[in-house]
Image: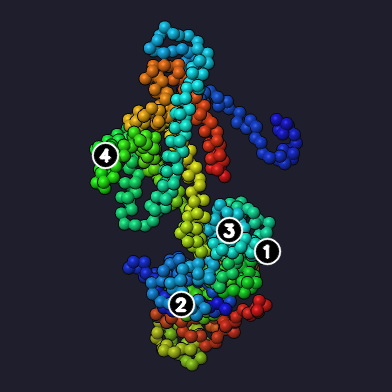
Amino acid sequence: MATQTSTSSAATALPAKRVGRRSVNTWPLLSPSVILLFLWMIVPLAMTLWFSFQYYNLLSPEVAGFAGWDNYSYLLTDPALWTAMINTLYLVFWVLVITVGLGTLLAVLFDQEFYGRGVARLLAIAPFFVMPTVSALIWKNMLMHPVNGLFAFFSRSLGLPVIDFFTDFPLTSVIIIVAWQWLPFALLILLTAIQSLDHEQKEAARMDGAGPFSMFFFIILPHLARAISVVIMIETIFLLSVFAEIYVTTSGGPGLASTNLAFLIYLRALREYDVGGASAGGVIAVILANIVAIFLVRSIAKNIAD
Amino acid sequence: MSTVVLKDIRKSFGDVQVIKGVDLAIEDREFCVFVGPSGCGKSTLLRMIAGLEEITSGELKIDGEQVNDVPPAERGLAMVFQTYALYPHMTVADNMAFSLRLAGVSKEERYQKVRDAARVLQLEPLLERKPKELSGGQRQRVAIGRAIVREPRVFLFDEPLSNLDAALRVQMRIELARLHEHLNATMIYVTHDQVEAMTLADKIVVLQGGIVEQAGTPLELYHHPRNLFVAGFIGSPKMNFLNCTVSAVEAAGATVQLPGGASLTVPVHPGPLKAGDQVTLGVRPEHLRPSETGELQAEVMVVERLGGETFLYCQLAGVGMLVVQADGEVATQVHDRIAIKLNPVNCHLFTADGMAVERAIRHPLADLRRPVARKAG
């Protein structure tokens, strides 16, 4: 405010800080959307918080009332939570590694000129359009099934022992399925990014003596850094809440071997009818997501802003 | 020593031939400029020399050694691109040192060379910046620096100034000329701007439709264009052309009948010209002047006053427009009728197939060459 009342020469010397240039009050115009969005967020959050402090089990309605931190202490002392949390991070991490790694290599491949490139691109992107439930069912019954599956057929015909994926490697199997679904997304984003690489830059690198490997590590990969950040950010948001693939294939088992946080909440709420415990799990999931977001989104947003 | 020799170089994209047999010898330390209209193949030719485009047929020799199948990095050339093509994620110093890094040069040596090049280009304070923090002219200098660091046998420039604004372009042009003298290297430069070509070149190569129309010193092209295309392309505003009939041929020249009845004896070696032939008379705007004794009567349609000089666009009855460069002081107004004086010494004659008739007097500056600096040894 002081800048406005000072002399004009002093005002121009200061960096332009326009205060109150728009005198119209915009709040009445903005408020309906802002209030709606706020309610949209706050009501479920408040209800989750409320239930997480209540004894609320549908199987024992006689036990009700304020529970204090009981739901939380029960959950946090329950080894299942830690297993689920580790499984969640493990799943997110490996799916990211596979989709970004393979996606980058495939993007470089699909950027080359070859016969039938258009069809190949379409096929590579197709898995993204298949519903998670459907693709998980296909993987379960047609590919990974120890009796009917294609993989079992191959190993049998080679005389090798058949692998029962969902029993022996449950989380790995889920990771494979989810990675298969998300690879096209990474490929799509990275391919468009590669195509925006300046042609003359590649030629300049060629003149400077860059072979295929130097070209990839010094020119293409740095160019993709921003797109890779976007892929990691968006995928993380979705991968933290993977559910359908687990539900359809392993149901979180054997034991808790492939249970992630989302599935654990489901187990508490709908298998054990413990609404209070499930809500506490939900709150913990929100906190976990925020911890990840603080680390990830901050660093990536900085990268994007550059 | 670095010479570049092109022998019957051809390039086809599918069925379309874009370079139709180019023969050219670029000498050591020469500044050679390829100039021509859009799509004439000048950039393609440069990219073939660089190794970025394959040579369909013909022979490319650098220092007498055939390099048709040598990959670009091993030809010992450096190229400056139109968009500069700097690596955006590297600092200026890393950009300039990139080729040396790939070649496995030690870090100390790399940065020594980068500093040397930066000193020449006044880039020293900018070495730690990223390209996006630089202005257009600075980026241009970094691109040139990246070329200098490699100590190439030949520098290639692909329209390097066309992304700069007019004032900066003039400044960079002068810097390039000084740089050429300082480095004493062979340079090949592509442009569509004939002012750049005239001012920078030791040798201009005018290309059109994939063939060389003429190659020579700037003033040779200006004073002795080989054909109508070169005559029209070199010079601004472009040369005026008048259709005339030859009325008499002597040893001293050919006499032509001008539109309007006057006749003019142009000093040329007439060769096969004979009376009655249709010819085109070419004369540049700067060689015409309004004068009461002028041979051509015309009406002024447009007057462009640039201060120092004035261009008069005159309508010549039954012929078309004629551009006259007059002194900046003339008071001529639109729709004035003026008489235009032709000086026969400055006129060119072109036969019906567009080829120039050899002029009788060779211009004294047509074979003028830049003195070769020998300080680098």
Rounded to the nearest angstrom, the CA distance separating label 3 from label 4 is 53 Å
Q: Chain of mark 2?
A: B
Do labels 1 and 3 touch, CB within 8 Å? no
Q: Check the image and name the residue furthest to the bottom.
A: B251
Relative to residue B369, is residue B235 depicted above or below?
A: above
Amino acid type at mark 1: Arg
Rounded to the nearest angstrom, the CA distance separating label 4 from label 1 is 69 Å
Amino acid type at mark 3: Asn
The image's mark for residue B102 is none
Relative to residue A77, is residue B364 depicted above or below?
A: below
Rounded to the nearest angstrom, the CA distance separating label 2 from label 4 is 60 Å
* Residue highlighted by disc 2: B66
Do labels 2 and 4 touch, CB within 8 Å? no
Do labels 2 and 3 touch, CB within 8 Å? no
Rounded to the nearest angstrom, the CA distance separating label 1 from label 2 is 35 Å
Q: Picture coordinates of residue A187 (x, y %)?
A: 40, 46
Q: Quadrant of residue B11?
A: bottom left
Q: Residue at x 49, y 18 (%)?
A: A74
Q: Quadrant of residue A56?
A: top left
> Which mark's residue is nearer the viewer, 2 or 4?
4
Q: Chain of mark 1?
A: B
Instruction: Point out the tag, 2 or 3, that comes first from the N-terminus.
Output: 2
Amino acid type at mark 4: Gly
* Residue highlighted by disc 4: A149
Q: Residue at x 45, y 16 (%)?
A: A276
For the residue pair A297 and B178, the one nearer the viewer reads as A297
Q: Picture coordinates of residue B213 (x, y %)?
A: 45, 76
Callout 2 and callout 3 share a chain: yes
Do labels 1 and 2 touch, CB within 8 Å? no
Decide if residue B282 is in sight here: no
* Residue highlighted by disc 1: B119
